Image (cartoon, rainbow, N blue to C red):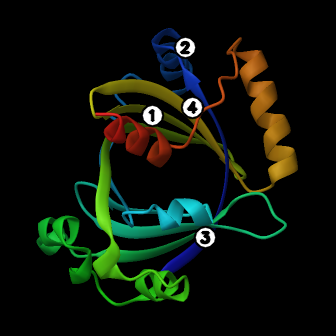
Amino acid sequence: MSQTLEIEFKTLLTQTDYQKLVVAYFQQDRIPFVQTNYYYDTPNFDLKEYGAGLRIRQLNDRAELTLKTPLKNQYGLLETNDDLPLDDISTFIKSPVSWPHEHVIKKLNSFAIYANELELKAQLKTSRLEINLSPDVLLVLDESWYHGKHDYELEMEVTDATIGKEFFLNFLKEHNIQLVSTKNKIARAVAENTDK
C-alpha cells in the first residue's frame, strides 16, 4: 500500500501540439508505455458525489487498485494504492468483491461504500510518455482512447500547487499552447460511456 499526494495541472492538446511536445522532449527511440484504466462507482455514483475516483490500472508488468479522494483545505487528491497480482487481473476487473481486503477497500468502507455495490463504469486505454523536467515537475503526455473517443492531454504533476500552477502556465505560454479546461480521465470516460 502507498499513499501519495497528487497535485497536477492539465490541458487537452491538439494532435499537432502533442506531436510538437513529443519531438521537443522525447528522443525518437523513446517508446511510450500503455496502460488501461477500469473505472468503478456505485449505481448512484456515490464516489463521484464525494469527489472521489476509483480505478484498476493495468500495465504490462503490474496492476494496481487506486482510490483518489479530495483533501480538505488543500489542492490535490490523496491517492491510496494497493498492488494487484496480474495473474488474477481478469477476475478483479469483472468482480470488485474479489479485490483484496486491504487499504483501498477499508477506505471505501469508511465512506459506507462496499465492494458488492461497485460496478464497472468505463474503460480507457492510454499511451503515455513521462519525463522529469525537474525534481518537482513531471511532464506527462497522454494519447487516450475510450468508448469511441480519442484525445491528447498534457498533465504536469508537481509537488507544490502554487509554484506548479505558475510553472504550468508559463510552460503553455512558452510552447504557444492554449489552455483547454478538461475533466479528468474518469469523468470523460464515464460521461462518454453513459451517453451511449
* Residue at the spot 12% in from the left edge and 72% down from the top edge: 87
Q: Residues within 10 Å of mark 4 (few under 14, many from 20)?
A: many
The quarter of the picture where the C terminus appears is top left
Using the numbered discs, state the Cα–Cα distance from disc 4 to disc 3 in whole angstroms.
20 Å
Amino acid type at circle 2 is Asp
Residue 57 in view of the camera: yes
Amino acid type at circle 4 is Leu
Does the CB distance between marks 3 and 2 fall below 8 Å? no
Using the numbered discs, state the Cα–Cα distance from disc 3 to disc 1 in whole angstroms.
21 Å
Amino acid type at circle 1 is Asp
| Labelled disc at residue 4 | 3
Sequence-wise, which precedes: disc 2 or disc 4? 2
Sequence-wise, which precedes: disc 3 or disc 2? 3
Q: Residue furthest front?
A: 44
Using the numbered discs, state the Cα–Cα distance from disc 1 to disc 4 in whole angstroms.
6 Å
**Residue 42, located in which quarter of the rendered image?**
bottom left
Q: Which residue is mark 2?
A: 17
Residue 37 in view of the camera: no
